[in-house]
Image (spheres, rainbow, N blue to C red):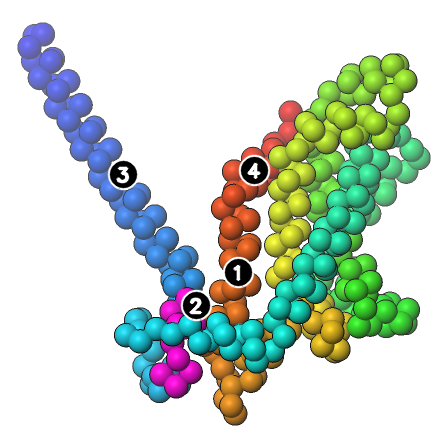
Amino acid sequence: MTIQSSADYGKIEKAAKRKSRIRHTVTYALLAIWAVIVLFPFYWMILTSLKSYGSYNAEYTPKLYTLSPTFQNYVDAFTQVPLARYFLNTLIFTVVTTALMLVVIVLAAFAFARLSFRGKDLVFTLFLALMMIPNELVIITNFVTITNWGLRNTYLGLILPSVTSVFYIYLLKENFEQIPEELYKAAKVDGTSDLRYLLKVMLPICKPTVVTILILKVIECWNSYVWPRLITDEQAYFLVSNGIQEIRENGFGRENIPAMMAAVVVISVPLLVLFLIFRKKIMAGVSRGGTKG
């Protein structure tokens, strides 16, 4: 009876291991297929940037390889248009916008999370309702406002509409509310000001979320396209998004796609490096923001 039971147990264990191996094989196979689908656009972007202008336009059927790679497209990307100047403009726009936004959302999130004032819940509800407004309507309103203020083709006109975010305020508020309120009351008893408590207690505790917001905002500003194209028509204030479009249209009578792809590769590298370095903090911040209690 014992021998039979041991044999049956062995068969069950082998069957379970076989099912586990099959399940893992199928899972990894699906993940590999998904990875290829996700990474293929990046491969195609780099491949196209290494093809010459003539060979690319001579391909009636796109090829998945090239036998004569060239870096001339990268040279063209910086010589056909002042791409270095656009990089500097984008860097100024990204740094200033992110810094101002951080100040605004941190103070707003702290007010909604810890301060008590009349109509706080109603104001926060109205803030969340703003997320329901289509982005197109907001862009039109911002464009009219910035134009009426005479701020077109200025850094201020580029930056002002992006210095706040309802979503980031909500995300940070949820994190602040996870900090026990007893700490705040104890700090007030000790005579600590609200600003000092915010800087010395709340921000260090919520550092993963703050870092996540910073990185996401940097990516958002760096990739900004519609608003810079709409509010600037002077080359001195163009961002890299404008530069890509210029390169695309500067192809000796045809679209210079290889040079444009080279510019996209150069522009994408800082963001990819930034994400790879801080990916763990981004995941930790987002998961912390979505978990309460």
Q: Nearer the viewer, mark 4 or mark 3?
A: 4
Q: Is 51 in the magenta?
A: yes
Q: CA distance from mark 4 to mark 3?
A: 28 Å
Q: Are marks 1 and 4 in contact (CB under 8 Å)?
A: no
Q: Earlier in the sequence, mark 2 or mark 4?
A: 2
Asked whether 16 or 93 is in front, the reply is 93
Residue 273 appears in the rendering = yes
- SS class of the residue under badge 2? helix
Q: Earlier in the sequence, mark 1 or mark 3?
A: 3
Residue indicated by mark 3: 24
In the rendered structure, which amino acid carries the disc numbered 3?
His
Q: Nearer the viewer, mark 1 or mark 3?
A: 1
Q: Quadrant of the rendered structure where residue 102 is?
A: top right
Would you call the spot at circle 1 few (<14 residues within 10 Å), some (14-19), or many (20 or more)? some
Q: How many marks?
A: 4
Residue indicated by mark 1: 268
Label of residue 281 in the image:
4
Q: Are marks 2 and 4 in contact (CB under 8 Å)?
A: no
Q: Earlier in the sequence, mark 1 or mark 2?
A: 2
- SS class of the residue under badge 4? helix
Q: CA distance from mark 1 to mark 3?
A: 34 Å
Q: CA distance from mark 3 to mark 2?
A: 32 Å
In the rendered structure, which amino acid carries the disc numbered 1?
Ser
Q: Residue at x 71, y 38 (%)?
A: 172
Q: Earlier in the sequence, mark 1 or mark 4?
A: 1
Residue 112 appears in the rendering = no
Label of residue 45 in the image:
2
Asked whether 229 or 74 is in front, the reply is 74
Asked whether 49 or 36 is in front, the reply is 49
Q: Which residues are magenta?
A: 45-55
Would you call the spot at circle 3 few (<14 residues within 10 Å), some (14-19), or many (20 or more)? few
